[in-house]
Amino acid sequence: MRRLARRGCIPRAVDPWAYPALVSTHAPAAPVLAAASAPRWRADRTVVILGILSAVGALVRLPFVWTGISMDEGGYAYVAQRWAHGGDLYGSAWLDRPQGLLLVYRFLLGIDGSGWTIRAGAVLVGAGITALAGSIGWQLAGRRAGIAAAAVYAIAGLAPRLEGFTLNGELLASLPAAAAVACALRWRAIRAPGWLVLAGVCAGMALTMKPSGIDGIVVAGTIVLVTERSWRAAGLLLAGFAAPLLACAVDGWARGWSRYWTAIIGYHLAAMGSQASNTSTRLSDFLSSAERVAKDLVVPLLFAVAGLVASWRRRATVAIMLAWLAAGVIGVNLGGSYWPHYYLQLLPPVAVLAGIAVAAVRVPWLRAVALVAVVAPTAAWLVALVPMGQSAREHTIPYYGLARRDERIAAEVRASTCPGDPIFVLVSEANIYFLARRDSPYPYLWGKPIEKIPGSLERMRAVLSGPHRPVVVLLNSSPRSVDPSGQLSTVLGERYRKAGSLQGMPILRSLDAPKCGN
């Protein structure tokens, strides 16, 4: 019986060895059974409510399946498809993301290659994080806190200005990271070692989605520290954590360790060092992003602070949640450029803390008012979309108007080139490659790698002047802004002629390229 109690099969509060009266032959059975059935009924009801809230989280994200894919989503999809069709990952199919993210994209595009499954994946991930936020809040502060946390993330987690409905690396990393926290808390409750190993595996998977996805291992490690400081527990967590990372490292070694290290870690370290040396630029980027994301984050953050205050007597809860917030802040800063979607990493812990704050309100109607206040900014944005026309929505939903423009450009490129013709976008509109179903002979799709990777500009000029150069070059950026030396402009002037523009984007065509229509 002691062993069953330690494993969680018998709650410690009713351990018969601690309370012999409960197993006395003279003790009445009916009150004990009634007391046991009431918590079970409440638990079952809570699970159902969390399931309903997850469905709500999916429903509010569902309309964004049809708003086109963003620049990052299209770039990930393009590299994943090239890899699936035999491309050399981290070579000709280059991306500065680990294999986990690309495997998710390969799976989704394997279902349907047109792209809608990418946003469908974002719907499922959002629903999953909603359920996990509820589970974490429940385990930390009770069923009301869990329900409130799930409700907060279901709506506020959409975070339109943070692009919470797109399948970016931050959203993908947040799912296994939150799963790691939930599993570690389950281990804390029942001490079953399998839960701790699973927490480590989930934490490792978060890092295979994005290198800044450190929150899973940081929080799971904190849970171990505040529970029992044993080498055995730490070893179990780290063993699980190492498994997915080791699998990625072995695959990277097989592909060529040097280029794998450069893509996943070396390039990012170089970029961080350069940005750290330019403090004014970094501060300017942060302030610019903060102004944009404030409308999505300020109210939930205020409630998160209230949640910390409400939890102050539960020191373990405070330590766990502070570790989660700190890991999220570090993750945002590791990205360096402060794009709005970087802040998505903060939303799961903020939702849990906001849920704790809402649950701490004793009066039911005030508790409902507090919950509405947390989600009000995002809910108002969603409601305002309903009466809007198509044009207004394209201006209101981030990336929607740009996605529609890029779809039209891709259709024109597809009609004016042969299926095997290479193209090049200067630079960063990587979704055009995926939408146009055309390959690029140049591996780097975004501007940052061109700025930070040695020899990238020289390689670009060689590709554009070589015998197998792109048939079409789309100028999303000025050649002078990419290469201030002017050599890129010279190459383009010698090898290409202007062929008009598509949706305001200048188009160059190779001088010796034959015209081809599909």
Image (cartoon, grey):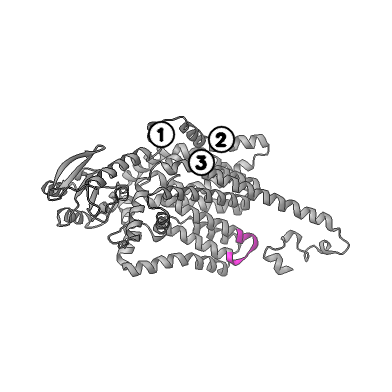
Depth check, front residue: 403 or 513: 513
Segment colored magenta? 186-194
**The N terminus lies in quadrant:** bottom right
Q: Residue at x 40, y 50 (%)?
A: 333
Rendered location of residue 423, percent (x, y): 23, 50
Picture quarter containing residue 90? bottom left
> Which residue is identified by label 3?
60
Picture quarter containing residue 33? bottom right
Depth check, front residue: 208 or 332: 208
Classify residue 324 as left or right of residue 28: left
* CB-based contact (under 8 Å), mark 3 and mark 2: no
Q: Residue at x 62, y 65 (%)?
A: 192
Check disc 2 and report its element: helix, strand or loop: helix
Looking at numbered disc 2 in the image, what kind of residue is underneath it?
Answer: Ala
Local packing at callout 2 (Cα closer than 10 Å; few below 14, some 14-19, many 20+) is: some
Nearest to N terminus: mark 2 or mark 1:
2
- Give the Cα distance between marks 2 and 1: 25 Å
> Which residue is identified by label 1?
393
Q: Residue at x 39, y 61 (%)?
A: 99
Looking at numbered disc 3 in the image, what kind of residue is underneath it?
Answer: Val
Rendered location of residue 61, percent (x, y): 48, 43
- Give the Cα distance between marks 1 and 3: 15 Å
Nearest to N terminus: mark 3 or mark 2:
3
Q: Nearer the viewer, mark 3 or mark 2?
A: 3
> Which residue is identified by label 2?
373
